[in-house]
Image: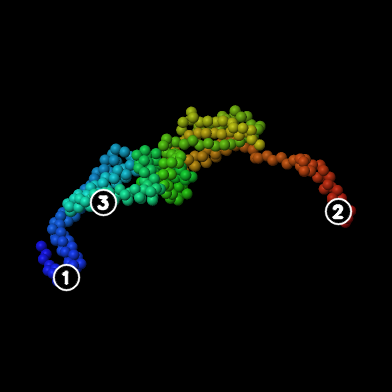
C-alpha cells in the first residue's frame, strides 16, 4: 500500500494523486494476472498455429479445393487467437471490457459493412466460392473478357494469368455473378474450322477427304462425335465446317492442334486436287450511274483520236 500525505495539496491535485495512487496499487495487485495473461496469449498463439497446421493437413486429405482449405485454416487460426484474447481479458478481470468490446465490434462491423459494401460483397463471395468451388487453382477459365489460368483464390479476389503473360485480379463478386467458362472441367475441347471449296468439286468426296484427314491426326478423341456439315453457298465457294474434339491440358496445345488441322486439310486437298478458291469479284459498270465497258472503250478511242489530231 502506497501512503502519500495529501494534506498539503489543493483539492484538484488531491483527486489526481488519489487516482494515480489507486492505479498504482491496482497495477501492482494485477501484475501477476498480467503476466499470466501474457503467458495465456502466447500459449493460444502457439495453439492457433498448431490448429492451423492440423486443419490444413486434414483438409488436404479430405478435399482438393485449395480455396476452401485456406478459408477454414484462417478461420480456425483467428478463431483461436480471438478466444485467447477473451480468456486473457477475463484473467485481467476486465469482464466489462469484454462486453463493451463485443458490443463495439458489432457496431463497428455494421458501420464498416455500409461503408465498404464492395469489399464485404467480395468477402462473402469468396466464402461462397470456397464452398461451391466452381473454379480451382490451375483451371483455365474465361470471365469478364479475360481468359487465363487460375493462379490463386482468396477471400477477396481470384488471380488469373492470361496467355499474354499478364496477371489479372478479378473481384470474387464478379466471379460469382458473371458467366464463367471453365475449359478444364471436362478435360477436352472442340475445335471448329470453317473452310470453302470450289463449286466444281464433288462435295461427297470433299467430305470423305476431310473426315479421313481428321481421323488420322494425333490427339483427336471421340471420333464418333466429329461433325462435318456444309453451311451454305458463299460468294465464290461452297462453305463447310469441321468440328472435332481434342484433349485439353492447356491452351497452347489447343492452338497447336487447330493450326495442325488447318495444315493437314490443306495438304490433303492438294493431294486430292481439291481447290480452295480465291474470292471472285465481278465489276459491273453498267449499273445505274455507271458506264458500260463498250461505251468506255469508245470514249477512250475518241479521246485518243482527238489527241493525235491536235498533235
Question: What residue is shown at x 36% (from left), y 38% (from top)?
Answer: 132
Q: Position of residue 201 (x, y in %)?
A: 64, 31
**Which residue is most to the bottom?**
8
- Categorize mark 1 by other alpha carbons within 10 Å: few (<14), some (14-19), many (20+): few
Rounded to the nearest whole Å, what is the CA distance between mark 3 and mark 2? 104 Å
- Categorize mark 2 by other alpha carbons within 10 Å: few (<14), some (14-19), many (20+): few
Residue topped by disc 2 = 307
**Which residue is most to the right?**
309
- The one nearer the camera, 88 or 21, is 21
In the drawing, what numbered circle is on residue 9? 1
Question: What residue is shown at x 73% (from left), y 41% (from top)?
Answer: 283
Question: What residue is shown at x 65% (from left), y 33% (from top)?
Answer: 199
Rounded to the nearest whole Å, what is the CA distance between mark 2 and mark 1? 128 Å
- The one nearer the camera, 306 or 150, is 150
Mark 2, secondary structure of its residue? helix
Question: What residue is shown at x 32% (from left), y 45% (from top)?
Answer: 70
Which is more foreground, mark 2 or mark 1? 1
- The one nearer the camera, 47 or 167, is 47
Which is more foreground, mark 3 or mark 2? 3
Rounded to the nearest whole Å, what is the CA distance between mark 1 and mark 3? 38 Å
Q: Is residue 73 left or right of residue 244?
A: left
- The one nearer the camera, 141 or 271, is 141
Mark 1, secondary structure of its residue? loop
Q: Is residue 64 above or below residue 102?
A: above
Which is more foreground, mark 1 or mark 3? 1
Residue 247, by quadrant, is top left
Q: Position of residue 263 (x, y in %)?
A: 55, 40
Residue topped by disc 3 = 101
Q: Tell me if label 2 and label 1 are in contact, CB under 8 Å.
A: no
Instruction: Say which quadrant the C terminus sits in.
Output: bottom right
Mark 3, secondary structure of its residue? helix
Circle nearer the N terminus (1, 3): 1
Amino acid at each position: 500500500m502506497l501512503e502519500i500525505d495529501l494534506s498539503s495539496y489543493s483539492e484538484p491535485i488531491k483527486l489526481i494523486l488519489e487516482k494515480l495512487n489507486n492505479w498504482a496499487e491496482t497495477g501492482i495487485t494485477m501484475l501477476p494476472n498480467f503476466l499470466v495473461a501474457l503467458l495465456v496469449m502466447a500459449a493460444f498463439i502457439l495453439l492457433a498455429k498448431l490448429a492451423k497446421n492440423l486443419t490444413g493437413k486434414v483438409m488436404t486429405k479430405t478435399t482438393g479445393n485449395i480455396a476452401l482449405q485456406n478459408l477454414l485454416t484462417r478461420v480456425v487460426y483467428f478463431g483461436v487467437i480471438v478466444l485467447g484474447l477473451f480468456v486473457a481479458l477475463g484473467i485481467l478481470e476486465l469482464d466489462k471490457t469484454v462486453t463493451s468490446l463485443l458490443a463495439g465490434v458489432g457496431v463497428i462491423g455494421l458501420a464498416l459493412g455500409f461503408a465498404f459494401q464492395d469489399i464485404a460483397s467480395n468477402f462473402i463471395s469468396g466464402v461462397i466460392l470456397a464452398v461451391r468451388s466452381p473454379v480451382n487453382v490451375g483451371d483455365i477459365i474465361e470471365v469478364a473478357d479475360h481468359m487465363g489460368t487460375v493462379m490463386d483464390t482468396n477471400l477477396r479476389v481470384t488471380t488469373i494469368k492470361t496467355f499474354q503473360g499478364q496477371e489479372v485480379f478479378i473481384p470474387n463478386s464478379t466471379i460469382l455473378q458473371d458467366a464463367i467458362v471453365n475449359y478444364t472441367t471436362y478435360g477436352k475441347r472442340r475445335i471448329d474450322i470453317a473452310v470453302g471449296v470450289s463449286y466444281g468439286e464433288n462435295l461427297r468426296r470433299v467430305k470423305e477427304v476431310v473426315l479421313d484427314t481428321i481421323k488420322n491426326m494425333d490427339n483427336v478423341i471421340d471420333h464418333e462425335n466429329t461433325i462435318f456439315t456444309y453451311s451454305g453457298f458463299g460468294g465464290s465457294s461452297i462453305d463447310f465446317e469441321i468440328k472435332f474434339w481434342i484433349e485439353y491440358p492447356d491452351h497452347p496445345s489447343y492452338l497447336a492442334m487447330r493450326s495442325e488441322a488447318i495444315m493437314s486439310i490443306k495438304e490433303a486437298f492438294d493431294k486430292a486436287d481439291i481447290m480452295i478458291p480465291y474470292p471472285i469479284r465481278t465489276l459491273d459498270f453498267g449499273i445505274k450511274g455507271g458506264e458500260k465497258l463498250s461505251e468506255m472503250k469508245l470514249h477512250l478511242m475518241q479521246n485518243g483520236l482527238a489527241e493525235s489530231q491536235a498533235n
